[in-house]
């Protein structure tokens, strides 16, 4: 521990000394009387001793969902007792505590106490919590001793998820069994069509009603249930942040939601963090992949970079053929736009979910910024038009609107546009 | 502020004419106290020093008669310092138990009463006939050196 003295203690010492010297010089008792209480305060400060304190901190959970509360318990004990022990748990801005992260307690000799802090996790992320700064003070605060205790432990705050009833179906499925009804014909449950019998067809596939009507043997065809490969393409080149909200926060929530639900459907899901810091996860299925994706999302952040980057830098296994690529982007950076068009040119089934930054950038009405804002919106419209020209659905996800709404728009687009 | 105002009021009422001669020090001290309260304690020592200096100057200018209210003035100065520091500490907004405030209030009260008693004792001792002038002088000098030494020792820790 490091000892400190109050700023007023040297002032008291100076006052006391000056009073005594003035008493001697002037031959009067009043300055000496003035010095007496300050001398007593000095004696009281000197009489204080360095406290012995034991501080341990722990969290009741290390994985929580965004919006949940986690309790930090600080266990204290002191052999000699402390008149005033101030504690501060340094918290990142994403975590908050009611009444602040600082507490002051009094510990009697040999007493053990516990201070509990309810930490509210306002935003997802990977944080370290648990280190405690403490300051023991004497009763008047003339001397203090400061130190740190506790071990910084990781706290994972997972993004909250949206409720989705339906997902975007990919245009093409993979070869493994899954929950997605394939467009191909084969062994399955869903009825697809009728065709004339061919050698090798099983007897149970014969449609006897059609056979009776047409006077030749006709069989049923089914659509098999297959899995799909889904690649979540997260644009981390740029974001718009205002009043504690950002496009990247919502993009991460959307990615976590989509990953969870696609993995529940036994699909293989991969992740590409495309930005100043490039990261990827090869598509795989299972719960372990969900945790891997969420862990990767927790550390995803917007890193500004001027490097020209295309999809060539990604390992080929990251983007398997016939994969559904769900790009979650605020459409702010040209490099992402070029990369997505490149993906479409390579034949990937691409969907762009635009995380709208418009709600976070509102110019003052009547100001010159309003014109710039309109031009910016026009340029965004032009970019959307470019995507639509090559058959890529672009849906806008506005703040306060459920994620299910833009996904339904994608389904409607596909139903009407009937892409090849 | 009230304690500080009390010290200045006492000093200015005792000061001989022209009182205006003592006003600059008092005004500067009050301004410094205001600065200290606003800016987290900077200038508090100088404010106390100026108030004490104004009081001593006014008492010295008033004549040779011993001022019996000196212990009270001393305690008011100490209270001003302690309560200002407490006020500044409270701005940190640290949530604490109620007994902490009671403990500090008790500490200040005990220190003030003890200071009052010691200061009153000093004033009472000054009434002793000065037949042993050299001994008192040596004792006073030793006390001054001791106070300065204590201050230096505390400042180094």
Image: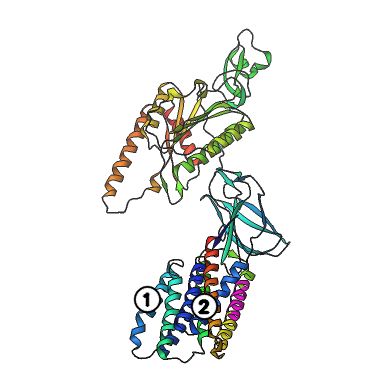
- Start-end of magenta stretch: B102-114
Q: How is the image coloured?
A: rainbow
Looking at the magenta stretch, what is its main secondary structure? Answer: helix
**Residue A306, horizontal then vertical, whole percent:** 37, 33
Evaluate whether label 2 is on the same chain as label 1: no
For mark 1, give the secondary structure: helix
Q: Quadrant of residue A97?
A: bottom right
Q: For this view, does A32 lie left or right of residue A60?
A: left
Q: Between residues A342 and B83, which one lies in front from this camera angle?
A: B83
Q: Between residues B89 and A129, which one lies in front from this camera angle?
A: B89
Q: Residue at x 47, y 24 (%)?
A: A314
Q: Residue at x 56, y 63 (%)?
A: B94
**Residue A307, horizontal then vertical, whole percent:** 38, 30
Q: Quadrant of residue A76?
A: bottom right
For mark 2, give the secondary structure: helix
Residue position marked by numbered label 1 in the rendering: B28
Q: Between residues B20 and A320, which one lies in front from this camera angle?
A: B20
Figure quadrant of the C terminus of chain B: bottom right
**Residue A117, horizontal then vertical, whole percent:** 62, 56
Visible residue check, residue A238: yes
When the figure is inspected, residue A269 is found, relative to residue A83, above or below; the finding is above
Q: Give the Cα distance between marks 2 and 1.
A: 21 Å
Residue position marked by numbered label 2 in the rendering: A35
Residue B107 inside the magenta-drawn segment: yes
**Which residue ends up furthest to the right in the rendered image?**
A110
When the figure is inspected, residue A278 is found, relative to residue A132, above or below; the finding is above
Q: Residue at x 33, y 41 (%)?
A: A377
**Is the residue marked by circle 1 packed among few (<14), some (14-19), or many (20+) residues within 10 Å?**
some
Pinpoint the chain carrying mark 2.
A
Q: For this view, does A149 lie left or right of residue A342?
A: right
């Amino acid at each position: 521990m490091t000892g400190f003295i109050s700023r007023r203690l040297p002032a008291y010492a100076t006052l006391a000394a000056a009073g005594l010297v003035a008493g001697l010089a002037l031959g009067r008792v009043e300055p000496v009387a003035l010095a007496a209480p300050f001398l007593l305060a000095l004696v009281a400060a000197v009489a204080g001793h360095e406290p012995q304190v034991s501080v341990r901190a722990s969290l009741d959970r290390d994985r929580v969902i965004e919006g949940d509360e986690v309790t930090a318990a600080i266990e204290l004990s002191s052999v000699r007792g402390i008149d005033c022990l101030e504690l501060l748990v340094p918290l990142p801005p994403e975590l908050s505590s009611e009444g602040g992260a600082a507490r002051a307690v009094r510990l009697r000799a040999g007493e053990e106490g516990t201070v509990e802090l309810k930490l509210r996790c306002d935003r997802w992320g990977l944080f370290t919590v648990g280190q405690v700064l403490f300051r023991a003070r004497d009763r008047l605060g003339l001397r203090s001793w400061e130190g740190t205790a506790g071990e910084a432990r990781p706290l994972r705050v997972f993004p909250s998820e949206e409720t989705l009833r339906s997902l975007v179906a990919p245009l093409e499925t993979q070869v493994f069994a899954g929950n997605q009804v394939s467009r191909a014909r084969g062994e399955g449950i869903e009825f697809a069509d009728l065709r004339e019998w061919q050698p090798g067809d099983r007897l149970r596939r014969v449609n006897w009603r059609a056979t009776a009507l047409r006077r030749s043997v006709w069989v049923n065809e089914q659509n098999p249930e297959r899995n799909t490969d889904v690649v979540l393409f997260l644009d981390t080149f740029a974001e718009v942040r205002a009043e504690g909200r950002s496009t990247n926060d919502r993009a991460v929530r959307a990615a976590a939601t989509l990953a969870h639900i696609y993995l529940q459907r036994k699909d293989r899901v991969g992740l590409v963090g495309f930005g100043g810091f490039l990261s990827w996860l090869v598509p795989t299925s299972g719960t372990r992949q969900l945790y891997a994706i969420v862990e990767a999302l927790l550390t995803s952040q917007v890193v500004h970079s001027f490097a020209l980057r295309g999809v060539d830098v990604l390992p080929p296994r990251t983007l398997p053929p016939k994969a559904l690529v769900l790009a979650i982007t605020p459409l702010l950076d040209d490099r992402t736009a070029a990369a997505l068009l490149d993906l479409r040119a390579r034949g990937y089934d691409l969907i762009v979910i635009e995380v709208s930054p418009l709600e976070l950038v509102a110019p003052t009405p009547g100001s010159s910024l309003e014109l710039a804002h309109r031009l910016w919106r026009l340029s965004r419209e032009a970019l959307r038009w470019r995507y639509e020209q090559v058959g890529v659905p672009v849906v806008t996800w506005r703040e306060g609107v459920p994620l299910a709404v833009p996904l339904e728009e994608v389904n409607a687009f596909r139903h009407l546009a009937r892409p090849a | 502020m009230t304690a500080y105002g009390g010290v200045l009021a006492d000093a200015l009422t005792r000061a001989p004419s022209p009182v205006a001669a003592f006003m600059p020090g008092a005004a500067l001290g009050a301004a410094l106290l205001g600065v200290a309260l606003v800016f987290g304690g900077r200038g508090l020592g100088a404010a106390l020093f100026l108030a004490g200096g104004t009081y001593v100057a006014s008492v010295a200018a008033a004549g040779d008669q011993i001022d019996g209210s000196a212990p009270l003035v001393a305690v008011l100065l100490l209270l001003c310092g302690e309560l200002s520091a407490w006020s500044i500490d409270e701005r940190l907004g640290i949530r604490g138990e109620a007994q902490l405030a009671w403990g500090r209030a008790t500490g200040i009260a005990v220190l003030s009463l003890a200071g009052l008693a010691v200061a009153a004792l000093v004033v009472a001792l000054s009434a002793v006939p000065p037949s042993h002038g050299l001994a008192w002088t040596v004792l006073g000098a030793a006390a001054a050196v001791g106070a300065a030494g204590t201050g230096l020792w505390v400042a180094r820790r």
